């Protein structure tokens, strides 16, 4: 562990400086928590024991590390948690009276492919990690050598729990972090440090009796306040799962082909979501307005090249096609899609019957079942 002159520093003033530096790097806020997660550990184990994590085995394999940040980096006594807003600063968002309504309208057009807002631009892992590393470098220049480790959704860190402890926000009933000034449309990142920064107090919840996020979930994955069964969640099904999507959930997915924002779109606090100052989060390849047919036409080479530097690339071409096949099957069942477009969709699906993997083929055949029965 590196040493540094901790005892000679006025830590209260360092916090003011730290917040200024964080904002200069386009972080919306930065807060400090201790490392005590003893309250959260039993809830995590109960959730894992119920199997709600699905095939995300890494969550159960490293559960003990999640409960103690010091196990991830020896000497850790504080966690710096940052938020970075990701709502794209483009003309559509700037001119919207309520950006959530524009996003909801996309769900009503069965021929459009809906991709979660966070995934339309560059991969947030790299963007946040680079800026957190820069922040760590600036801290080192200020206070001298210190021990730290940076995390961006990249290790067994209970980031929402730590962010809640630090006062960065409160946990909403959809299990995401909520902030009065920024809703939930932001990424979280952490720096585990051996520096005794003053701890920020947590804030109270402001969800009240609201159950909008629970009520709107297409697959009823939010089984109760603060309870999520990932196995039913569209984000899990389209991103984390590599298996066939359960038949009973396919029609409920609609045209959501990568992730799902519904619980966030329904949340009243997201009316206050902040536009991002980071150009990396602007949509690429028209992913904010693109048809299912356009995306289906991409070859594997086009998928890999166009999603270079995108979080979408990690799911691979097979899962991408699986998701699109479900969306196209739902388009064939949709009253909002013209008969002419339905024919184009059916033809495009049939064109891949001979060349698709068994996984994708299963979803194509399901998609075409409805069309053939008409």
Image: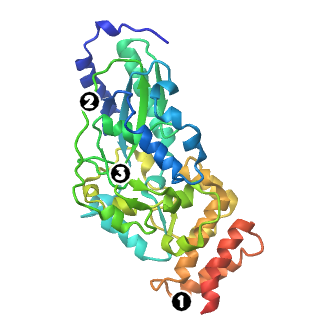
Q: Which residue is mark 3?
A: 185
The foreground one among 305 and 241 is 241
Q: Is residue 129 left or right of residue 77?
A: right
Question: Which circle's residue, 1 or 3, is located before the other in the chain?
Answer: 3
Vertically, is 74 above or below 357?
A: above
Q: Nearer the viewer, mark 2 or mark 3?
A: 2
Look at mark 2 in the image and give the residue it sits on: 200
Quick one: SS at disc 3?
loop
Q: Residues within 10 Å of mark 2 (few under 14, many from 20)?
A: some
Residue 346: x %, y % from top left? 63, 82
Query: Mark 1–mark 2 contact, CB under 8 Å?
Result: no
* Element type where label 1 sits in the image: helix
Q: Is residue 245 visible?
A: yes
Viewer-nearest of discs 1 and 2: 2
- Give the mark toward the camera: 1 or 3: 3
Coordinates of residue 129 in the picture (x, y in percent): 48, 34
Disc 3: CA contacts within 10 A as few (<14), some (14-19) or many (>=20): many
Q: Position of residue 215 (x, y in %)?
A: 34, 67
Q: CA distance from mark 1 to mark 2?
A: 58 Å
Does residue 26 appear in this view?
no
Q: Quadrant of the C terminus?
A: bottom right
Looking at the image, tell me whether mark 1 or mark 2 is earlier in sequence order. Answer: 2
* Residue with the most extreme bottom position: 374
- How far is mark 2 from mark 3, CA to CA? 22 Å
The reply to whether discs 1 and 3 touch (Cβ–Cβ < 8 Å) is no
Q: Residue at x 56, y 37 (%)?
A: 62
């Amino acid at each position: 562990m590196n040493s540094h002159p901790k005892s000679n520093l006025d830590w209260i003033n360092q916090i003011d400086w730290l917040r200024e530096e964080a904002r200069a790097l386009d972080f919306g806020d930065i807060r400090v928590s201790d490392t005590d997660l003893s309250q959260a550990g039993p809830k995590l184990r109960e959730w894992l024991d119920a199997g709600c994590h699905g095939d995300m085995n890494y969550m159960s394999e490293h559960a003990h590390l999640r409960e103690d940040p010091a196990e991830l980096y020896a000497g850790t006594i504080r966690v710096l948690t940052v938020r970075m807003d990701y709502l794209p600063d483009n003309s559509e968002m700037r001119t919207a009276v309520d950006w959530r309504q524009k996003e909801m309208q996309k769900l009503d057009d069965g021929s459009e492919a809906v991709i979660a807002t966070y995934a339309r631009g560059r991969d947030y892992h790299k963007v946040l990690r680079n800026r957190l590393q820069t922040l760590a470098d600036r801290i080192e220049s200020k206070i001298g050598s210190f021990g730290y480790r940076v995390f961006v959704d990249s290790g067994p860190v209970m980031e929402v729990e730590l962010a809640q402890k630090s006062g960065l926000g409160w946990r909403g009933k959809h299990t995401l972090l909520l902030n009065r000034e920024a809703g939930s449309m932001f990424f979280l990142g952490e720096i585990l440090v051996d520096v005794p920064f003053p701890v920020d107090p947590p804030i109270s919840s402001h969800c009240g009796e609201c159950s909008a996020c629970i009520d709107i979930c297409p697959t009823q994955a939010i089984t109760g306040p603060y309870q999520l069964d990932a196995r039913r969640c569209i984000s899990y099904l389209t991103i984390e799962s590599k298996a066939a999507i359960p038949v009973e959930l396919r029609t409920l997915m609609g045209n959501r082909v990568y992730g799902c924002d519904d619980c966030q779109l329904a949340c009243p606090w997201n009316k206050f979501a902040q536009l991002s100052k980071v150009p990396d989060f602007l949509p690429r390849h028209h992913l904010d307005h693109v048809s299912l047919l356009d995306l289906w036409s991409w070859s594997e080479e086009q998928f890999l090249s166009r999603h270079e530097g995108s979080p979408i690339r990690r799911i691979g071409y097979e899962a991408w096609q699986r998701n699109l096949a479900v969306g196209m099957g739902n388009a064939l069942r949709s009253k909002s899609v013209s008969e002419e477009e339905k024919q184009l969709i059916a033809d495009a699906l049939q064109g891949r019957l001979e060349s698709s993997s068994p996984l994708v083929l299963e979803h194509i055949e399901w998609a075409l079942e409805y069309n053939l029965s008409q």
